[in-house]
Amino acid sequence: MSALRARVAGEANVPFFSMSGSEFVEMFVGMGASKVRDLFRQAKEKAPCIVFIDEIDAIGQKRSGGQYGGNDEREQTLNQLLTEMDGFDGSNGVIILAATNRPESLDPALTRPGRFDRRVPVELPDLKGREAILKVHAKKIKVADDVDFLQVARMASGASGAELANIVNEAALRAVRDGRGFATQADLEESIEVVIAGYQKKNAILTDQEKKIVAYHEIGHALVAAKQTNSAPVQKITIIPRTSGALGYTLQVENHDHYLMNKQELENKIATFTGGRAAEELVFGSITTGAANDIEQATKLARAMITRYGMSEDFDMVAMETVTNQYLGGDTSLACSAETQGRIDEQVVALVRKQHEKALSILKDNRGKLDELASYLYEHETITGEAFMQILNAA
Ligand code: ZN
């Protein structure tokens, strides 16, 4: 959310005071409340101005209601904030903004009329937005002259503002660790993987057979993606285990962000999710637990196609599910009869099965390339998109 902070500060032509919720609670006991008082005293003096509180959930979580285990420091800080906000009547020219990734966790007292009573959902940044955010954060560190921020932004598809800030920080740390005075393109690219997939853990215990299975699994995804039209080209695949628990990790770079995906593209995406498991089945004749996340994603997508995007024959443009949480997560609730739910479940299974079969047949048709690519990945532990396409397109 600190990207939001930078944006607000940059566009408001009035004094801007900002503080992060986590800064308040990290202080010594009693300091949080006095810091809040301080902030608002300065704001009143400098009005008209904007007060921005980042990560407000750090202090604004629902209060424990006097139970044991409550965080006194946080509650004192929150109470002080509420008191200060009530002291404004809207005519003194101080606007108070706050940001959070978890609006549902906020204490209801904060969102009462007269306090934070207006919500503005902020979407994840698009390609241009990511590039701009990276550049803002990169100003705080030294970077090589030839860094291509657009390329970094392209690789960090789906990253939030906070994650992009982390990527830049991580790149600076890497440069320091290597004794360099500035961060390079490689630092930034490696940092994407660190921030998104957890730290590299070389020498992790992965048996030879496991490594082979993971290599086939990841190539399975990539090959199914590459063989379907409109699929993103593969940038880099690695089978170096990460501390996050993800074994392999396929990075797909989309050449442009699209907000509209057609039915065909969604089906292809489901097929790509099933490609990992399909390769395991085809090559080893057995299946592993490694596809749990793929299964979850494929199911989610298939379900959304039927219940929310109106992409099934049976239900036409009728919404079977409504999104109840438009922020992160996107929880949904069913809005149909139990009998219809049964039919939805059947259709979800049929949709995923059809794509799974498509993935299997793509891999069968390209078995030679599958073997070649998987053994390259097994050998090198990493394969770039370039090397991948070279092997794929070689006669
Ligand atoms: Zn997978």
Image (cartoon, helix red, strand yellow):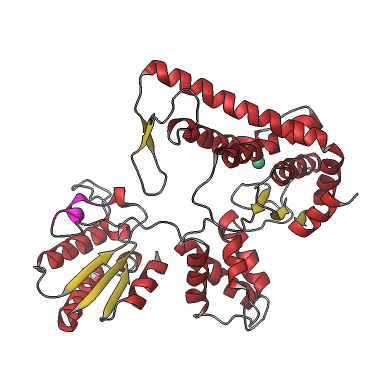
- Residue 25's spot in the image, x, y percent? 31, 64
- Residue 98's spot in the image, x, y percent? 28, 63
Which residue does the image show at 77% across and 41% down from the upper left?
216
Q: Which residues are magenta?
A: 106-113
Which residue does the image show at 19% across and 56% down from the upper left?
117
Q: Quadrant of residue 294?
A: top right
Quarter of the image that includes the N terminus:
bottom left
The answer to if 109 sits in the magenta stretch is yes
Which residue does the image show at 75% across and 27% down from the upper left?
286
Residue nearest the observer in this picture, 241 or 95:
95
Picture quarter with ligand 1: top right
Q: Is residue 67 left or right of residue 387?
A: left
Residue nearest the observer in this picture, 109 or 312:
312
Which residue does the image show at 38% across and 72% down from the upper left?
7
**In the orientation shown, which residue stands out farthest toward the top?**
339
- Residue 220's spot in the image, x, y percent? 73, 41
The answer to if 45 sits in the magenta stretch is no
Residue nearest the observer in this picture, 176 or 192:
192
- Residue 297's spot in the image, x, y percent? 55, 39
Q: Is residue 201 above or below residue 9?
A: above
